[in-house]
Image (spheres, rainbow, N blue to C red):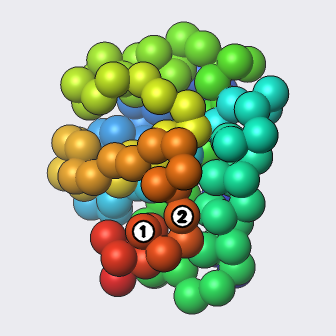
Amino acid sequence: MADYREITTIEQWREALESSGDKPVLVLKHSTTCPVSAAALEEYEEYLNGSPKDGVDYVMVKVIESRPVSNQIAEDLGVKHESPQIIFVKDKEKYWTASHWSVTKKHIHAVLD
C-alpha cells in the first residue's frame, strides 16, 4: 500500500506543487461532512491499497478544515473548486482532474497507469 499524507498548510501545498516538477502529485480534496466525498476517499484508499503507481506523491486536503489550502490549490492550478475532487499535478500544472462520483479507483488507474 502506498501512503498518503494530509496537507494542512499553504507552505506544504507549495512544496508539493514545486516538487511535482520531479515527482507527480495526486491530490484528493475531501469534505469530512459529505457522503459523496466519503465514497471518493474510499476509492482513493482502495487504489492505494492495490497496485498504485510508484513515483507519485499521494496527498489529501480536508476542504473544510484547511479551506485556505483548498482555495490556494484552486487558484494555483486554475481549477474550479469542487468536493470531492481529485487532481493529478505534473510539472507544476494540472494534468487531470475529476470530481464527485467520477473520483474512482478505475479512473485513477486509467490516468496514472
Instruction: Give how far apart the Cα atoms at labels 1 and 2 are.
Output: 5 Å
Please name the amino acid that badge 2 sits on.
Thr
Q: Residues within 10 Å of mark 1 (few under 14, many from 20)?
A: some
- Residue at the spot of label 2: 104
* For residue 88, above or below residue 81: below
> Contact (CB < 8 A) between labels 1 and 2?
yes
Q: Secondary structure at mark 1?
A: helix
Visible residue check, residue 6: no
Residue at (34, 62) in percent of width and height: 23
Residue at (73, 60) in percent of width and height: 42
Q: Secondary structure at mark 2?
A: loop
Furthest toward the top, the residue is 68
Residue at (35, 53) in percent of width and height: 88
Residue 48 in which image quadrant: bottom right
Please name the amino acid that badge 1 sits on.
His
In-front residue for pair 74/22: 74
Percent position of residue 74, x then y: 36, 23
* For residue 73, above or below residue 85: above
Q: Residues within 10 Å of mark 2 (few under 14, many from 20)?
A: many
| 73 to the left or right of 33 | left
- Residue at the spot of label 1: 107
Residue 32 in which image quadrant: top right
Visible residue check, residue 97: yes
